[in-house]
Image (spheres, helix red, strand yellow):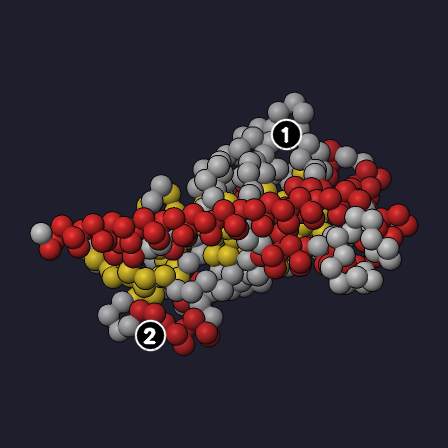
Amino acid sequence: MDMIDLGLDKWLEDHAGEFCGSEYSVARVIAVDRGQYTIKNEVGESHAILKGKFFHTAESAVDFPCVGDWVCVEYHDDENAASIHNVFPRKSFLRRKIAGRDVEYQMIAANIDVALVVLSCHFDFNIRRLERYLVVVNDGCIEPVILLTKTDLISPDELEQLIAEIRNAGIGTEIIALSNVTGVGVEQVKSIMSPRKTYCLLGSSGVGKTTLINRLVGNTELATKAVSESGEGRHTTTRRHLIMLEQGAMLIDMPGMRELGVLSAGKGLDDSFSDVVALSEQCHFSDCGHNNEPRCAILAAIESGELDQKHYQSYLKLKQESEFNEMSYAEKRKKDKNFGQLIRKTIKHKNRH
């Protein structure tokens, strides 16, 4: 295997010397589990740890390596172990606000070409959740593809209705309908996965991600659990890891996420709600608030049925959430910086005396 087979493109290769110098080697992070890293190069896999400088120079956990990252490493013990010294710039990423009240990023995975956003046609189907996933994907400069799973649990007419709901919400992303039970659609998923490209499966727990991976890999290497009587799957994936597929594509599996908070996703919002953005540009007043202003293109489109009102309300909700979290994040970083300056001044004062 060459490093190019792991996704090392021309730009990364040309800049490897700049990032790593001559003393370190290049590898890709293929698994992260409770602070433990597994990296891979053209020879094989190794366990790796972070050098101490990461804990002193990193501004936040976002700077730490995640699955899909390219890193500069120093090998030990005949390349069975390694130390990670630096992380390459990320060309794309998946990130979210961490769960709970804290306003901080969590980096999920990096350097992904296509995100396969998975929704079940049965219990999990939710347009608002899909919009949220697409915002996160578009914000990270990743191409989305929608996978509708468990089509064997509904009729063809019901499937068409679900697809129509997605299209009526202004979502034009490619859709592939499939069933892990019958195998329908699985070959179509395989056909869009190109060698040397990195893909990820993104969706709630129990929508069939692990079963789909087993079909794509061609074995039952990954553990799955039987579905409940309602047809709802059960969560099995416990860590993020990158899998090499037979055709040469790479796939990142990750646990389902109950919360997918949006933080500073201006570009992702604009790309995901391009229909709303385009209409707002047609309003008579440049500062139109889309409430009761005359000649408002948004209100006219909702009244005529051109724009789905729930879709527009979802846009407003995500925009408000993103702006609030972004403001809170900026305030938090300012407080952290001021606190750091105070600590340094205190240490400096003590050293003088």
Q: Nearer the viewer, mark 1 or mark 2?
A: 2
Q: Position of residue 152 (x, y in %)?
A: 73, 36
Q: Is residue 257 above or below residue 187?
A: above
Residue 291 versus residue 61: which sits nearer the camera?
Answer: 291
Q: Position of residue 58 (x, y in %)?
A: 33, 55
* Amino acid type, residue under disc 1 in the picture: Glu
Identify the mark at residue 99; answer none if there is no mark. Answer: none
Assign a secondary structure to mark 1.
loop
Q: Residues within 10 Å of mark 2 (few under 14, many from 20)?
A: some
Q: Quadrant of the N terminus?
A: bottom left
* Amino acid type, residue under disc 2 in the picture: Gly
Res 21 → quadrant: bottom left
Assign a secondary structure to mark 2.
helix
Kindly identify the residue that appears in the image at 44 percent across and 56 percent down.
68
Q: Is residue 15 above or below residue 243?
A: below
Q: Which residue is mark 2?
A: 17
Q: Earlier in the sequence, mark 1 or mark 2?
A: 2
Determine whether, in the image, residue 10 is placed left or right of residue 45.
Answer: right
Q: Residues within 10 Å of mark 1 (few under 14, many from 20)?
A: some
Q: Which residue is mark 1?
A: 232
Q: Position of residue 105 (x, y in %)?
A: 46, 48
